[in-house]
Image (spheres, coloured by chain):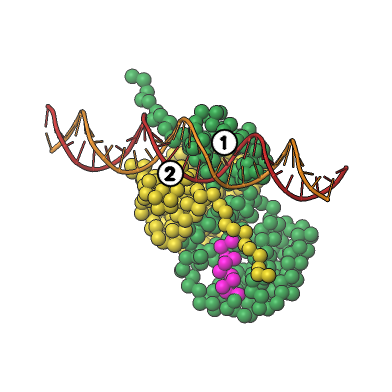
Chain colours: A green, B yellow, C orange, D red
Amino acid sequence: MTKAFQPLERAPAYMKVFRAIEQRISDGGLKDGAHLPTEAELCTQFGVTRSTVREGLRLLEQTGLIVRGPAKKFFIKRPLASDIAAAASKSFALGGITFHEVWDALATLYPQAARLAAKRLSAEKVAELNKVRTTLALVANDDHEATVDCAVEFFQQIAKGLDNRVMLAMLQSLNLMIGESLRHVIARAPKAKDRILNAQKKLVEAFERQDADLAAEWMTKHIDDLKRGYQVAKVDMDEAIL
Amino acid sequence: MTKAFQPLERAPAYMKVFRAIEQRISDGGLKDGAHLPTEAELCTQFGVTRSTVREGLRLLEQTGLIVRGPAKKFFIKRPLASDIAAAASKSFALGGITFHEVWDALATLYPQAARLAAKRLSAEKVAELNKVRTTLALVANDDHEATVDCAVEFFQQIAKGLDNRVMLAMLQSLNLMIGESLRHVIARAPKAKDRILNAQKKLVEAFERQDADLAAEWMTKHIDDLKRGYQVAKVDMDEAIL
DNA sequence: ATAATCCTATTGTCCGACAATAGCAATATG
DNA sequence: CATATTGCTATTGTCGGACAATAGGATTAT
């Protein structure tokens, strides 16, 4: 007797539409920036109705593979690190991730990131970082909004400087998750800004000297400070973020 | 004159449906495991037609917030670390991430993960790891499939043992991305398995002694070996994965 | 008691229609 | 002639209804 049959491929048509287009994107048939045919055109090509095509498009839309251009037209977009980070941090939040888990990941990743940064950051990037730092020094002490923005921007610049999209996405997703809570902390821990400024200064120095150990050391202190900030602000670390 | 009007909120109805349900999930109104009302029910509640509701459901579906239960009914599901990892690694692949970037992230994250594991892994978890290791020792030398599975499983167990869903998701997404390429490497680098086994042995020893430095050291060697494997297998590290 | 069959609720797909909108062409106005 | 306005057209967003496919549960037959 010949071999048993494979279970045959049964997926809803809208799913097949999704996968077909996704496939075309990944194999380069639909290049980045190209625009998708109109819905009517897709109907005739796939031989299904608009409702079905549209359901498939919604899947693509949520995956982030197509974005609206002018005239509501969709065009193809390959996911950027920032998209992945945004999606991941949103999912984490919905999954009930705690401050503790985020902080733990920060404490693990960022000192290493600082090590890499010390080795890889170009002189221009370090100068850029320094500019962010001086900007932070200039903002009013009670402007918590701007303070947080600068503090997060400093992290962002380091992440971007690593020249690695995987790490960028991971670090950015952490940045997004701490951003909100940081606002909370800074509003309640008045001395936080000075400590942040000091850590940033030492970090920039370490980057200038390309001293990986020093960079890691100060980054660790910086992250530890954040935890202390949470404690001062009486944030329950086992509470879910957002 | 009174202040200018805000641009009014104009989003397609299907998007509003999506956001409304998403909101209900995140604020706990729809609990994990609860089942979504039928499409017809949602139609009456939102006051839109089924087509519109269904487009919204497709968005939820792709976000991973609802999954099909028996009878095709949708059930609410909060995203798990593994879902986030799967989505992220797929996006990375579509974004054209290179082997080099993945390896770079591996080399940065896993030694630190090993450090944490040395401190946190329970005795049972270490025993579990040891079991994976002995399983790998027993598989035939030419069974590349099983070899890869065991090698990846070893990483998975470490990731799970950290007891941190953020790190778990990040490490898992890396695991998914190397999985495929590892198959390629092991088929071409015959001695790879022995080196993997040795590294795993040393790692387990380090975990048993809770020696973080030793664990990090051997994990670094382990990851470096992987890179050497790529070179032996003549994989172009600047090529996109998958 | 178990297996086969029917029933029903729900999803998947189709069709056709029309309103809303954005971009473009044609026109009016100075 | 240049600019502003208007109308045209292609496309998307939404609607309503229809029916086939399917999964689970109820019912019947053996």
* Quarter of the figure with the C terminus of chain B: top right
Q: Which label belongs to residue A39?
A: 1
| Amino acid, disc 1 | Glu
Query: Residue at label 2?
Result: B50
**Position above or below: B31 against A200:** above
| Amino acid, disc 2 | Arg
Q: Is any part of residue B224 visible from this angle? A: no
- From the viewer's perspective, is A114 left or right of B52? right
Few, some or many C-alpha atoms within 10 Å of disc 1 (few <14, some 14-19, many ≥20)?
some
How far across and how far down the image is residue A163, in percent? 69, 52
**Position above or below: A214 against B191:** below
Secondary structure found at label 1:
helix
Q: Viewer-proximal residue, A60 or B233?
A: A60
Q: Which residue is drawn at 54% across and 40% down?
A: A57
**Position above or below: A153 against A2:** below
Q: Viewer-proximal residue, A179 or A18?
A: A18
* Quarter of the figure with the N terminus of chain B: bottom right
How far across and how far down the image is residue A14, in percent? 48, 37
* Chain holding disc 1: A
Secondary structure found at label 2:
helix
How far across and how far down the image is residue D14, in percent? 49, 46
Few, some or many C-alpha atoms within 10 Å of disc 2 (few <14, some 14-19, many ≥20)?
some
* Chain holding disc 2: B
Q: Is any part of residue A84 visible from this angle? A: yes
Q: Give the range drawn in magenta.
A: A176-186
- From the viewer's perspective, is B153 left or right of A105? left
Total marks shown come to 2
Q: Residue at x 66, y 61 (%)?
A: A156
How far across and how far down the image is residue B152, in percent? 49, 46
User: For the stretch drawn in magenta, what is the main secondary structure?
Assistant: helix
